[in-house]
Amino acid sequence: MKNIFLILSTLLLGNISNAQVAIGKPTVEGNNTLIDFVSGTTKGIILSSTTNDPSTAANGTFIYNTTDKKVKVKSNDEWLDLSDEGDSSATTNTIDATAVEVGNGVVIGKETSTKVGALVLESDDKALILPKIFRPDLNVKNPYPGMICFDTESNTLAVYDGTNWNYWK
């Protein structure tokens, strides 16, 4: 609980122009990073939970849809499914998402944004570096639906849809 409070506090305090946030380590590596996570973690990012695919979401928005239990990203004004029900590396730890979005969210990277979201990363020259986890299907003991990280073994984006880990190159 303390870690969650610390992360949320860090994100809220990061709501300044050109902010960079290091989580679990003292500094951000590189000038092209908005949020950077400590190496060797077994914790990922939990996406916002929604009951539908919001039509007003900006391209690049990631969500966990609780109705169809899918991790999705909005690309070219369409919602793309990042869940693959045929994944043979499924884990059995499923927890129903109950997250609630409150307020207008936090903007990191610029003072303001026209985008709407719980956390908006807005920058012309910086990006998010996902938590790096070696074999999340083995090392994340209780994944939460909507969890997202980078698998260092396969060098892929790993997303957990509540039933399966799905890997995307």
Image: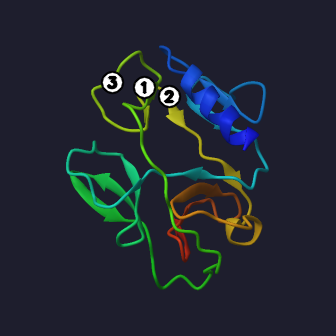
- Position of 116 with respect to 98 (left or right) is left
Q: Look at the picture and state if 47 lies above or below 37.
A: below
Name the residue type under label 1. Answer: Ser
Q: Which mark is residue 17?
A: none
Identify which residue is drawn at 44% across, 71% down. Answer: 83
* Residue linked to disc 1: 123
User: Where is residue 58 shown, x and y percent of the image?
Assistant: 28, 42
Given the image, on which type of amino acid does mark 2 rest? Answer: Lys
Location of residue 140 (image quadrant):
bottom right
> Residue 74 at what x, y percent from top left?
30, 53
Q: Which mark is residue 126?
A: 2
Mark 3 lies on residue: 113
Q: What's the residue type where badge 3 is placed?
A: Ser
Mark 2 crowdedness (10 Å alpha carbons): few <14, some 14-19, many ≥20: some
Do labels 2 and 3 touch, CB within 8 Å?
no
- Please state the horizontal and vertical placement of residue 138, each as a whole percent of the image: 74, 72
